[in-house]
Amino acid sequence: MAKLLFAPAYGGRSEISLEPVSGFTAVSLLEQLRRNNEILAQTLSELSAAGWELIQVETAPFIGDKTVTTTRYLLRKAKN
């Protein structure tokens, strides 16, 4: 369930799959988190270059599961 979701779709994509975080060792877990952070940073950089600005970041427990969180990034198209 590790995904970036776009509403509305961005660049013809409505979602980007991330590495499932299920490492059995600390090293594999950290590697999966590192790759996901790289994907997120790259995607946010692409959005910024396309004229979108990040205005809010919010985390919350996933519906019905307090051990899983969701992070929402609210962006808006920058005015010229």
Image (spheres, helix red, strand yellow):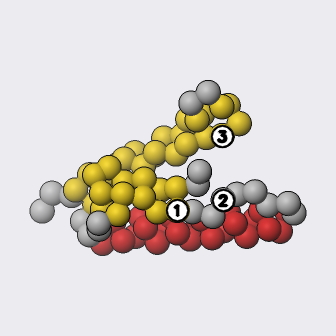
Determine whether 78 is above or below 63 in the image: below
Give amino acid for label 1.
Ser
Q: Image point 57% across, 63% down: which residue?
A: 18
Q: Nearer the viewer, residue 59 or 66?
A: 66
Relative image position of residue 8 (x, y in whole percent): 28, 52
Relative image position of residue 57 (x, y in whole percent): 45, 46
Which disc, if any, is residue 17? 1
Res. 52 image quadrant: bottom left
Location of the C terminus by quadrant is bottom left
Marks 3 and 2, how far apart at CA: 13 Å
Relative image position of residue 56 (x, y in whole percent): 40, 45
The residue under label 2 is 20
Determine whether 7 is above or below 45 in the image: above
Q: Image point 80% across, 68% down: which residue?
A: 28
Marks 1 and 2, how far apart at CA: 9 Å
Disc 2 crowd, CA 10 A, few/some/many (<14, 14-19, 20+): few
Side of 53 where 23 appears, left or right: right
Which disc, if any, is residue 6? none
Side of 26 where 55 appears, left or right: left
Q: Are marks 3 and 2 in contact (CB under 8 Å)?
A: no
